[in-house]
């Protein structure tokens, strides 16, 4: 039986029980075990892990752990090193709508199964957002974040901060229902679909080419502007 000693830094401690936070954890193991495998056995998903040091030297998560190793793991740095395109698990419908409202490409179905999501992410480079740490531990998942809050607005703030998205917002150009970018549409082409007051007071319209949903800058637009201002100032 061999023994290694793991210390997790900063927000990685969110995944550990109280007694293991910010202290060296004694990890007994047998055979050839990677740093990644032993770290995940403690409950920390690999997409959350960044710089790794072993006995004071920089190492990789895939390196084999040796008896007596002193392992320190830091969280991945904030920022987005790929295009900010997301996949959200089936419990995050409201967060999906919020992210789409801010202009981000979000793949979401309310009946996604873990195996299907992992299969898609194996070929489509997206960032997985979930509260299921076991899903994040799947080998196919390269980029992801485990949401800490249960509240959709707080979750949105987490995602904006973690991936530093403030400068990448493009509000009000993506369909909240089906994720497609809007297209401009002439008012005359959709007159028969508009309510009388909408026909009277609004002239600029957009339409989703996939589902046909019509959008215009009504009172909801001002509410969403205030919402965006509030969430980006946090």
Image (cartoon, rainbow, N blue to C red):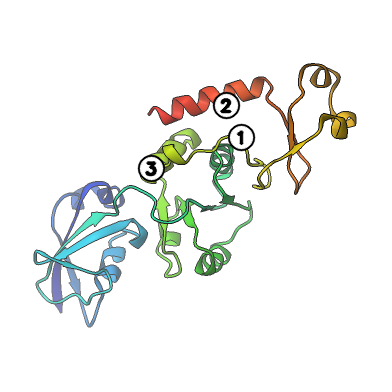
Placement of 112 over or under 32, stated as above or below: above
Q: Residues within 10 Å of mark 3 (few under 14, many from 20)?
A: some
- Residue 155 position in % (x across, y down): 45, 39
Question: In this image, 98 relative to 214: left or right?
Answer: left
CB contact under 8 Å: marks 2 and 1: yes
| Residue 150 in view here | no
- Report helix, strand or loop for mark 2: helix
Which quadrant of the figure contains the N terminus? bottom left
Q: Residue at x 58, y 37 (%)?
A: 101
- The residue positioned 84% from the left and 27% from the top of the image is 194
Disc 1, SS: loop
Earlier along the polypeptide chain: callout 2 or callout 3? 3
**Residue closest to the eye, 39 or 222:** 222
Secondary structure under badge 3?
loop
Above-or-below relation of 122 to 1 = above
Instruction: Residue under label 2, please give it.
Output: 224
What number of labels is visible? 3
The quadrant of the image that shows the C terminus is top left
Side of 231 relative to 216 (left or right): left
Name the residue beneath numbered marker 3: 164
Judged left or right of residue 72, residue 80 is right
The image quarter in which residue 200 lies: top right
Tell me the crowding category of disc 2: few under 14, some 14 to 19, or many 20 or more residues within 10 angstroms, Cα based: some
The residue pinned by badge 1 equals 172
Q: Is residue 164 visible?
A: yes
Work out whether 64 lies above or below 52: below
């Amino acid at each position: 039986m061999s023994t290694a000693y793991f210390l997790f830094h900063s927000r990685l401690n969110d995944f550990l029980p109280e007694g293991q936070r910010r202290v060296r954890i004694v990890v007994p193991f047998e055979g050839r075990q990677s740093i990644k495998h032993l770290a995940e056995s403690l409950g920390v998903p690999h997409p959350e892990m960044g710089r790794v040091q072993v006995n004071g030297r920089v190492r990789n998560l895939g390196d084999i752990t040796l008896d007596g190793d002193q392992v320190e793991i830091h969280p991945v740095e904030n920022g987005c090193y790929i295009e900010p395109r997301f996949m959200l698990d089936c419990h995050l419908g409201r967060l999906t709508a919020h992210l789409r409202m801010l202009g981000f490409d979000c793949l979401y179905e309310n009946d996604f199964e873990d195996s299907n999501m992992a299969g898609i992410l194996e070929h489509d480079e997206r960032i997985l957002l979930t509260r299921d740490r076991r899903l994040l531990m799947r080998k196919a998942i390269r980029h992801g974040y485990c949401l800490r809050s249960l509240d959709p607005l707080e979750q949105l703030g987490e995602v904006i901060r973690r991936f530093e998205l403030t400068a990448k917002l493009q509000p009000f150009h993506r369909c909240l229902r089906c994720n497609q970018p809007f297209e401009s549409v002439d008012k005359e082409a959709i007159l028969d679909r508009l309510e009388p007051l909408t026909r009277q007071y609004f002239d600029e319209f957009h339409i989703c080419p996939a589902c046909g949903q019509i959008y215009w800058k009504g009172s909801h637009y001002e509410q969403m502007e205030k919402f965006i201002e509030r969430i980006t100032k946090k």
